[in-house]
Image (tube, grey):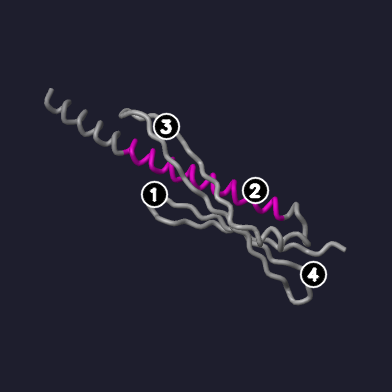
Amino acid sequence: MILGGLIMGAALTGMATLWMTHQRVLRESRDRLMATFILQSEMERCLAQGFHSIPAVAAEDPQEVVTERTFGTTRGTNTTTTSFLTDVFFENNGDETMRRVWVTVTYEDSRHGLRTLELETFVFKNE
């Protein structure tokens, strides 16, 4: 009986630790997935604007996207808010026929601090 209680206590402690780790990793994965989605959307917007409009897109102020998630736990309901800051940069090559475009998304990670994702491509002049 005592041995069964010890085994059950150890198992419950291990499961609680595993559950908390799972929740933390799930939250970090959601933030990274959302940052990737915002990054791809912003790059698609740049490509849709075309070669000649890229300087105007890059001159815009950095955009902020705020997400809010509500989830339930055994202790009640929690709400977390994450802010994603996007910025677009470009540079011309020497003969003005190609532009290097890169988009960055910066957000705050609860464990690792400030995180930045970057996506880069080249856009050619269409004549």
Q: Which residue is mark 2?
A: 41
Image position of 34 with respect to 102: above or below: above
Amino acid on which disc 3 is placed = Phe
Tell whether label 1 touches label 4 (CB within 8 Å).
no
Measure the alpha-carbon separation of dots 4 and 2.
24 Å
Measure the alpha-carbon separation of dots 1 and 2.
24 Å
Q: Secondary structure at mark 4?
A: loop
Q: Earlier in the sequence, mark 4 or mark 3?
A: 3
Tell whether label 3 touches label 2 (CB within 8 Å).
no
Amino acid on which disc 4 is placed = Thr
Q: Which residue is mark 1?
A: 110
Q: Quadrant of residue 6?
A: top left
Q: Earlier in the sequence, mark 3 or mark 1?
A: 3
Tell whether label 1 touches label 3 (CB within 8 Å).
no
Q: Which residue is mark 3?
A: 71
Residue 28 image offset from top left, x and y in percent = 44, 45
Q: Secondary structure at mark 2?
A: helix
Q: Is residue 108 magenta?
A: no
Residue 107 image offset from top left, x and y in percent = 48, 52
Amino acid on which disc 1 is placed = Ser
Which residue is drawn at the image coordinates 46% and 36% (left, top)?
Answer: 69
